[in-house]
Amino acid sequence: ILDISKIEAGRMTIEFIECSPVQIVSDVVALMGPRAIEKNLDFTVEYEGRVPRTIRTDSTRLRQVLLNLCGNAIKFTEKGEVRLVIRYEPDGEDGGRMQFRVVDTGIGMTAQQEQLAFEPFSQGDSSTARRYGGSGLGLAISRRLAEMLGGALTVESTPDQGSTFSIEISTGPVPDDALFDPSQEVGDPDGGAMDALPENGHTPDLTGKRVLLAEDSADNQRLLSFLLRKYGAEVQVATNGQDAVKAAFNAQAAGTPFDVILMDVQMPVLDGYAATSRLRREGYSRPIIALTAHALSGDRERCLEAGCDDYTTKPIRRLELFSMIERWASHGSGIA
């Protein structure tokens, strides 16, 4: 309501700064991906050709629009997929145009509903509002923001088949040598092209690897579970060290041991250090990787003394972490 009021009063400020469109997409996928997983939907990113490494736009407002469009697509799709498709079109010396298309296989809209979609406080009909909730402001705000970013927001939809929302914005001047193909350069399936590949150029493959994620933060649980599954891993979550110890031994007794445990060191009930020490004392020998928010001198040594095989810090560098998981999973057993 504050946003739409500011826009209508002409008081919404837009700050054009250099930013990475690929990083914005990665942020959106990281936040929306767990919602798609909860509904068993495929959520994918596609780059149609090369895109700029940086553009001049308001990253906060662009991210806001993409989060709204992807959130709506997931909300109104019960089965199938949601795709975020990105392309860049050069447009002379003054810059080019970035287009972001959010394609879903959801409930779709009639022509009349399309006309009303961008009106404030409007939704498809009363049954839509009752079933799905929402204020009816998201698309109205998104269209205004798209216009303020030098572009437009449009929709094409078919009832019971799905919708495609397209936002196009101006980029400012982009030199030809500033274009790259994120999928080829990084090979990261969720579009997160800001992580560097390991030195050997190998993209990790966790297909079939069983990972126990011991992590008490719900946001971190969703994000890491989403990313691990994107790389093919099977993931089980434990919310504290005590549950992690129990899950590790239960899986081993059932003949389906975890290939790797990711152990956050700061958790309630039993922290990661104590949980790892208990596992080692009771004969658990499979790999354990510590996750810690600290990067202080001595932290690595403390993790290794507790019995961890390896250690990495937050915020997580996903490709680095997943290469570490792949390497330790291939060992079959950890320090013992």
Image: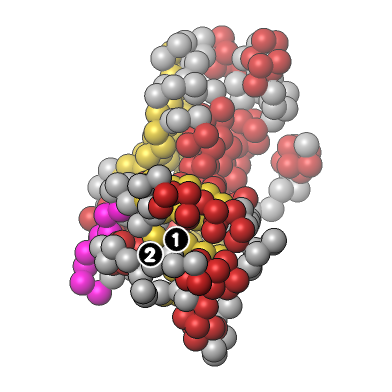
Name the residue nearer the viewer: 124 or 145: 124
Residue at horizontal 47 percent and vertical 54 percent from the top: 249
Q: Quadrant of residue 175?
A: bottom left
Coloration of the structure image: secondary structure
Which residues fall within the magenta stretch?
199-206
Residue at horizontal 50 percent and vertical 16 percent from the top: 107
Q: Magenta segment, principal secondary structure?
A: loop
The amino acid type found where label 1 is placed reads Ile
Name the residue nearer the viewer: 116 or 94: 116
Q: Quadrant of the C terminus?
A: bottom left
Residue 123 placed where, x, y %?
Answer: 65, 18
The residue labelled by disc 2 is 286
The dot on residue 73 is none
Labels 2 and 1: the sequence-earlier one: 1
Image height of 183 relative to 105, above or below: below
The amino acid type found where label 2 is placed reads Arg
Q: Are marks 2 and 1 in contact (CB under 8 Å)?
A: yes
Q: Provide the secondary structure element on which disc 1 rests.
A: strand
The dot on residue 261 is 1
| Residue 90 visible in this rendered orientation of the protein | no
Q: Quadrant of the N terminus?
A: top right
Q: Is residue 325 left or right of residue 221?
A: left
